[in-house]
Image (spheres, helix red, strand yellow):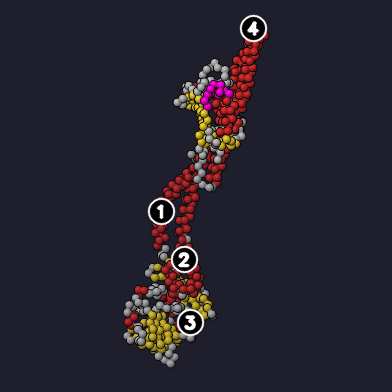
Amino acid sequence: MRKSIVYKWFLLLAFIFSTVLLFIGIAQNYFFEKYYINEKLNTLKTYMDTYSDLAAKKGSEAASADLYQNNHVWITKLDKYGRICDVKSYYLEVKLKDASQNIWRIPMYSFEGEFSSDVHSLLKEGDDVTIDAVNLADEQIPYQIQTGPMGFVNLNIADKLNGPHADKAYRNLETGLYRGTITKTVFPEQTGNLPFPYQDRYFLEQVKEFQAGLFADDAKLLQETEELSSTENFAEYRIIIEPVKKNGVTEYIFAMISLQPVDEAIAVIRQFYPYFLGFTLLCVLFLAFIFSKWLAKPLISINKITGKIANMDFSEKLPVHSEDEIGQLSRNINYLSSQIETYINQLKQDLDKEKQLENTRKEFIAGVSHELKTPLAVMKSCLSILKDGIAAEKRDHYFQAMEDEIQRTDMLVVNMLDLAKFESGTYKPEMSPFKIDEAINDVTASLAGQIEEKNIALTLELSPQTVFGHKGLISRVIFNFLSNAIRHTENGHAIVITVKSNEQAAEINIENQGNPISEADRLKIWNQFYRVEERSSKSGTGLGLSISKEILELHHVSYGVENTKDGVRFFFILPVQP
C-alpha cells in the first residue's frame, strides 16, 4: 500500500492542502484587518484620481452621485473655503439691501434645520432675511440665516465663534450682519428626494467640520493629502482630503469611505476556528483522497495497458481526456500499440503468405503428379502397342490418342501454373475500364464450334456497359463459365447469357439448361480437380472454376452458383466505370 502512487499522492496533497489552510488561518488572524483597511483606502484613492475627469464630463453633483450609487464611496469637490462646488440642487439666492445690491447664492446644506419638511414654507421668494457671515479677504461666508422667528445656523462655525466652546483661533475673524431679500429658491419637492451628497448628514457634517477648520487660520491651508478617521454609531470611516491646484487657487477633493466593523467578525471567526479547522481538515483529507485517485487513475491505466502490450495484447486502448502531458503520453502509447500490432499482423500475414506459397507448391506438385499419371499411362500404353506392332490397322488412332493426351497435359500445366500464381497472393492485376458486351462476344465467338457441335441454342441479352477490371482475366472467367455450361448442357438445349446493370454495378449471368447441382457438390465446386458428375470423363482439367474463383477474388467482387428452375446459373458482379 505504501508503495502505491495513490498513497503517495494522498500524502502530498493532504500536506499541501493543510499547509495552505494553515497559512490562510494565520493570514486571516493577523493580517486581514490591516489588508482590508489598506485595500479600502487604495480603492478610495483610485476613485479620487478619476473623480476630476468624471466631474468635468457630468458635473460635480452627478459624478458624486454615480460614485456613491455604484461604489458606495462619498466624494465631492470643495472650493478654497471648504464649500461644495457647483451646488445646483439645493440653494437660495439673496439680494442684499445695501449699496452693493450683490446677490449671494447660499448653499443650504451648511445649516442646521435645512432639511425640515416645512423648509419650503419658511424660505420663500420675497421674504426678508438677516444673514450673519464671516468676512474673509475676498468673500463672505454665511453661517446663520434668520427669517422672522425661524433661524438656520451652521453650528460648526457658530459654536467656534460665540458658543461656550469658542475657539481662540476664531477671535481674529471679522463677522458682519447683512440684510436682504430672497430672490430665488431651489429646493427638492420632497426632502426625501435630496440629491447626493445632501442626503447623507454624516458626510456633510465632516465637510462642514473641515470648512470650519479652514477659517481658523488662512495661513494653515492644507498643502498635502491628509487622512482622517472618525466613528459614527460604531461604524468607522476613513476620510482623505487631497488639495488640488487650479489656476493658482487651492481646491480640495474630499472623500470618505465606510470601514465595515471587522474586529467583532474576526473575534467570532477565532472562536469558530476549532470547529472550522476540524471540519475543513476532514474535507481536506477527503479531497486529497479523491484528487489522488483522480490524478493516479490515468497512470494506473497506463501501467495496466502497457502490461498488456508487453504480453502482446493490443485489444485495449488508453482513453484520452486531456491535452496535457498525460494525455499526450496516452496518445503516444496508443499509437505505439497500434504500430506494434500493425507490424505483428503484417509479419503474421507475411508468414501466412509464406506458408500459403509452400502449401501451393506442395499442392501443385501433388496435383501435377496425380493428374499426369493418367496421360503418361495412356501414352506409355500406346507406345507399347505401337512398338510391339499390335493392331497395326489402329496406328493412327493411337497416335491421335497420344496427341490428345499431350495437349491435355499442356493445358493442365498452364492452368496449374496460373492457379499457383493467382493463389500466391503476390499477383496484382492491372484494372482498367472495358466493354463487358465486347468481352462476352469475343468468348462466344471462340467457343462457337463447341456450341454448334452440341446444337445448343445460345441467347445473349447484353447491354453496352463499361465495367472496371482486368479484361483478359474477366474474359477467361467468362470462358471457363461458358465452357463449363457447354460441357453440362445436353444436345439441343439452351444457354442464356445476360448482363443486368445499374449505376453502380453490372451482373453477368451464364445459365444453362440441365441437371441441378446437389448441395454437397455446390460447396466443393470451386475446389481444384473437382468434377460434379461423369467422374470418369476426361474432358477439362478440373481447374477452370478454381482459376475463375481466384480471378474474381483478386477483383474483390461477388460471385456464385445457384440452381434455377431449368438448370444452373453462374454469376459474378463487376463495378461500373463512373
> CB atoms at circles 2 and 4 under 8 Å apart?
no
Residues under numbered marks 4 and 3 in contact, where contact means CB atoms less than 8 Å apart: no
Residue at 53% x, 17% y is 535
Instruction: Give the magenta range.
Output: 449-458
In x, y percent, where is residue 225? 51, 73
Work out which quarter of the rendered image holds the C terminus and state it. top right
The residue that mark 3 highlights is 217
Q: Looking at the image, which is closer to me, 406 or 71?
A: 406
Mark 1 and mark 4 in contact? Answer it, CB < 8 Å.
no
**Looking at the image, is mark 4 or mark 3 earlier in the sequence?**
3
Please report the residue visible at 48 percent of the width from the left and 80 percent of the height from the top.
80
Give the mark, 3 or 1, whose residue is nearer the N terminus: 3
Q: Is residue 533 left or right of residue 418?
A: left
Q: Is residue 457 magenta?
A: yes
Q: Earlier in the sequence, mark 1 or mark 2?
A: 2
Residue pictured at 54% horizontal, 42% vertical: 330
Residue named by callout 2:
40
Question: Mark 2 and mark 3: span between their CA atoms?
Answer: 32 Å
Give the foreground label among 1 and 4.
Answer: 4
Q: Is residue 501 above or below residue 281?
A: above
Give the residue type that dot 2 points to: Lys
Front residue (pair 22, 533): 533
Q: Considering only vertical position in the picture, is 13 above or below 424?
A: below
Residue 317, horizontal then vertical, whole percent: 51, 39
